Amino acid sequence: MDVYEAVTSRRAVRGFTDREVPREVLERVLRAAAWTPSASNLQPWHVYVLTGGPLAELKKRACERLTSGDPWDEPEYEQYPPALKSPYRERRSAFGEQRYGALGIAREDLEARQRAASANWDCFGAPVALFFYIDRDMGSAQWSDVGMYVQTVMLLLRAEGLHSCTQMAWAKYRRTVAEVLLPPEELLLFCGMSIGFEDTTVGYTRTGRAPLDETVTFVDGC
């Protein structure tokens, strides 16, 4: 698979089989991802790989919190600005319509939307989950570095025939994740990532992208 195919075939898969992902594949991906660029080579990412019993335990604890109505943890960073302006507001709204429309869920059916979102806590059935942390002392440039690292991991997974879904949703249950992973206090959970082989019986609608002239400006002498 060439890099163009890896980029264009990567998408957020929300349905995985229970087929095992060999550890040597995960190690190969993460070893190569270490070459992701970072300012002054700080490499500010900290990654936890969860499989088997520990992953099952995390899923169990998260689902127990969900069913008990336990509120989300206090956020440690803002996922979105408080008031999204145009065109970002419209793009987010369009994503929601496509995502839930594909599931046959009406915009006003909040209960059905919550049920669909609850699949996050089962990692959409995936047998592997990664959790990406960053040191609390790091700044916005290092957050950008971690984002590049996450993207590199996803593209390498595609090269291995695997799919993934990044999940900032796990930051809402960060305390539950910490109970299982026991990370140092100085680390902050950025996101999780579900990994595995796609369950092709789960339908999806591919989210579109803005046309090039909306996001790219060429400055040249022509």
Image (cartoon, rainbow, N blue to C red):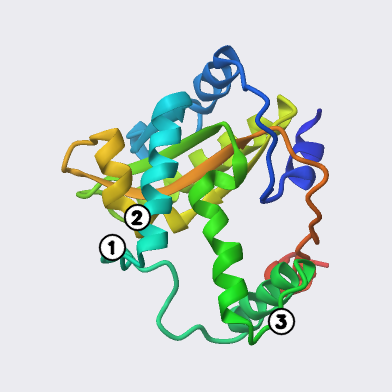
Residue kind at label 3, given as amino acid type: Ala
- Residue type highlighted by circle 1: Asp
Query: What's the mark number on residue 73?
Result: 1
Rendered-image quadrant of the N terminus: top right
Residue drawn at (53%, 28%) of the image: 33
Instruction: Name the one closer to the observer, 140 or 74.
Output: 74
Q: Is residue 37 visible from the viewing direction of this image?
A: no
Q: Tell me what residue is drawn at x 34 percent, y 42 percent.
A: 133
How far across and down, in percent of the image, does residue 88 sit? Answer: 59, 78
Q: Which mark is residue 173?
A: 2
**Viewer can see residue 125:** yes
Sort mark 3 into few (<14), some (14-19) or many (20+) by Cα contacts within 10 Å.
few
Distance of label 2 from label 3 (alpha carbons): 26 Å
**Which circle's residue, 3 or 1, is located before the other in the chain?**
1
Mark 2 or mark 3: whose residue is earlier in sequence:
3
Q: What number is the disc on residue 106?
A: 3
Q: Nearer the viewer, mark 3 or mark 1?
A: 3
